[in-house]
Image: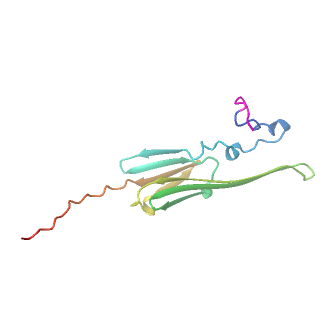
């Protein structure tokens, strides 16, 4: 359905609040997920450092995998909220399940033991060394007799 731009994408965000229901977890349910897994990448003398923002996630929800030179960060979250009245009847019951992932090429020579990972305050901090440049060997020629 087409809506005038004055309403934006969040016309009904406060709909349930108007009827006395607690607010819904809008970060997880939002259509606009461009603000999730924002990543800062820094180059240091020793290597690279990545800070991946994962607001609302716990350490157990996050996995990091290295395969074929790609470092993949994935996060999965499930939540359930329910509100009952005094007689135990449901007034509201919501469930959410979602997963996201992001991959970074870190070099085919990077090994799992080279990658250091730490999770604190909703930010996954990754560090890994720079890929060493491969030496270009001078071509060797075979002597031709005759």
Q: Position of residue 68 (x, y in %)?
A: 45, 62
> Magenta segment: does it hold 72?
no
Q: Quadrant of residue 27?
A: top right
- Position above or below: 13 against 117: above
Q: Residue at x 70, y 46 (%)?
A: 29
Q: Residue at x 60, y 55 (%)?
A: 75
How many numbered marks have been drawn onto this rendered protein structure? 0
Decide if residue 67 is on the left or right side of residue 94: left
Q: Quadrant of the C terminus?
A: bottom left
Q: Residue furthest bottom?
A: 145
Decide if residue 3 is on the left or right side of residue 54: right
Q: Residue 125 versus residue 72: which sits nearer the camera?
A: 72
Q: Position of residue 54 (x, y in %)?
A: 59, 48
- Position above or below: 12 against 80: above
Q: Residue 79 versus residue 122: which sits nearer the camera?
A: 79
Q: Residue at x 41, y 60 (%)?
A: 110
Q: Residue at x 91, y 49 (%)?
A: 86
Decide whether the magenta segment is chiefly helix, strand or loop: loop
> Magenta segment: does it hold 6?
yes
Q: Quadrant of the N terminus?
A: top right
Q: Which residues are magenta?
A: 1-7
């Amino acid at each position: 359905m087409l809506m005038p731009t004055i309403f934006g994408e969040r016309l009904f965000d406060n709909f349930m609040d108007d009827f006395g229901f607690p607010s819904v977890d809008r970060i997880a349910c939002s259509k606009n997920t461009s603000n999730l897994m924002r990543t800062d990448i820094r180059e240091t003398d020793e290597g690279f450092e990545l800070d991946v923002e994962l607001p609302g996630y716990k350490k157990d929800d996050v996995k990091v995998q290295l395969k074929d030179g790609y470092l993949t960060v994935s996060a999965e979250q499930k939540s359930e909220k329910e509100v009952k009245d005094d007689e135990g009847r449901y007034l509201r019951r919501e469930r959410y399940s979602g997963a996201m992932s992001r991959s970074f090429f870190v070099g085919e020579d990077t090994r799992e033991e080279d990658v250091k990972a730490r999770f604190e305050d909703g930010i996954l901090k990754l560090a890994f060394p720079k890929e060493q440049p491969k030496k270009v060997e001078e071509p060797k020629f075979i002597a031709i007799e005759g």
